[in-house]
Image (tube, grey):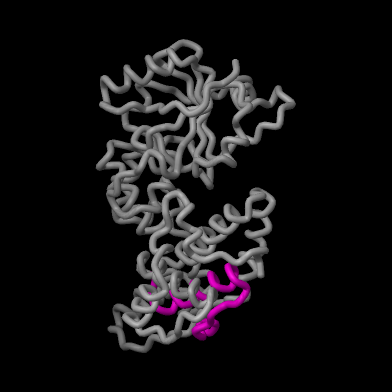
Amino acid sequence: MFLSKEYRPSILKEASPKIVGCELSDKELQKFLNEIDVEFQIIDNSTRWAAFAQYYAYQYNFNKIKAASFAYMVSLFMTGIGISLSTEMYFKEAQIESDLEDKLNQIKSKYDDEKKQMISLFRNIFWTYKQHSSKYEYATERLSFKVTLSEMEKFQAIKGRNNKEKFKKLIGDKMYTVSDNIHSKDLVKLGFPKDLCTSSESCEILLEHCKKYDMKFLKGSYYTLVHKDFDKYFKVSKSNKIRELLTCKDLNENINLPLDHVNLFKSKIEDDVYILTSSPYDPSLNMNLFNQIKSYPYSIYVIHPNFLDYAAFVDRDPVGALRNPLSNMNYAFTNASADQILNINQVIYGDLDTFVFEFLIDGSR
């Protein structure tokens, strides 16, 4: 086993946001397996995990073979026994397993709590199959059809050492970027870089979300979305002195801030007020996080996702879904006083009808 204890899928209900289907009963999962013509019975925890993984994969439109391979990998890592449906002829599953073992070692070095390790591991298995499965696929299919003389001339004009290489270029077998999407012009107008690596599905979700909630891509950021009027209230700061101050580089205290996808901003509303924003990979609000940040000397707020958000959080939800402010949270670490934040909130609320900063921890300074 990769984990010291054996957990049921229902443990994933502790994830934020809740992982769909984790609380289904064995009877409900078995009914689902029967409906999709998958022939195995739920008799133990390994088959239970495999059944749940199949259900979860189908919610994200995995095809039958991809869902079965995903279920094998989930059951293997969660229980030590993989439930195989003979998908090894389609996917390089030994390579997937090896890469996920490396990822698990990274996860274990980051989290002491095994439940958090398991939830993070499940998400990594899912994203491996959702975003990167094509690089693990074997070439198993064959095409045979006739084309016209002019079509063949166009095909041969494609650069490539052989027909297979030309075909891969033709269908776009490369890292997908915003420039490859049919909505690239609209996305670029919203600030998305042309060379931003993404997927067709992500482009659709992010474009719809930005249009619906008046957001844009923050120029020069690591996948950060902000309200289209963000620049009216804040400007990007390059101050290393303030960054070190808010990350407590000058202190010897044991403060482990959840700092991922960090941005530093200076307020245009209050003088000398800075906020350091962070959108951590595991952004759930729990006691473990509180223990990490309880001695932070400044104040910490949660940011409303319709004002600033991490694009990958948006990408986890269906097209146009309203983000829950308390799921997948973005944090603000700030030197501002409570009165200054209140004033910033009131000014922005007067314009946007949204309170941006929700109090979390009052610093000791």
Q: Is residue 116 left or right of residue 202?
A: right
Provide residue 164's location: percent of width, then percent of height. Answer: 47, 78
Quadrant occupied by the C terminus:
top right
The residue positioned 60% from the left and 32% from the top of the image is 293
Quadrant occupied by the N terminus:
bottom right
Q: Is residue 297 left or right of residue 162?
A: right
**Residue sitting farthest toward the right:** 252
Provide residue 18's location: percent of width, then percent of height. Answer: 42, 54
In the image, is residue 189 above or below residue 228? below
**Residue sitting farthest toward the top:** 271
Residue 302 is drawn in which quadrant? top left
The residue positioned 36% from the left and 21% from the top of the image is 345
The residue positioned 35% from the left and 58% from the top of the image is 201
Residue 136 is drawn in which quadrant? bottom right
In the image, is residue 146 above or below residue 364? below
Q: Is residue 48 visible?
A: yes
In the image, is residue 223 above or below residue 56? above
Provide residue 321's location: percent of width, then percent of height. Answer: 29, 49
Provide residue 184's location: percent of width, then percent of height. Answer: 33, 50
Magenta residue check for 103: no
Magenta range: 62-89
Q: Is residue 96 visible?
A: no
Magenta residue check for 63: yes
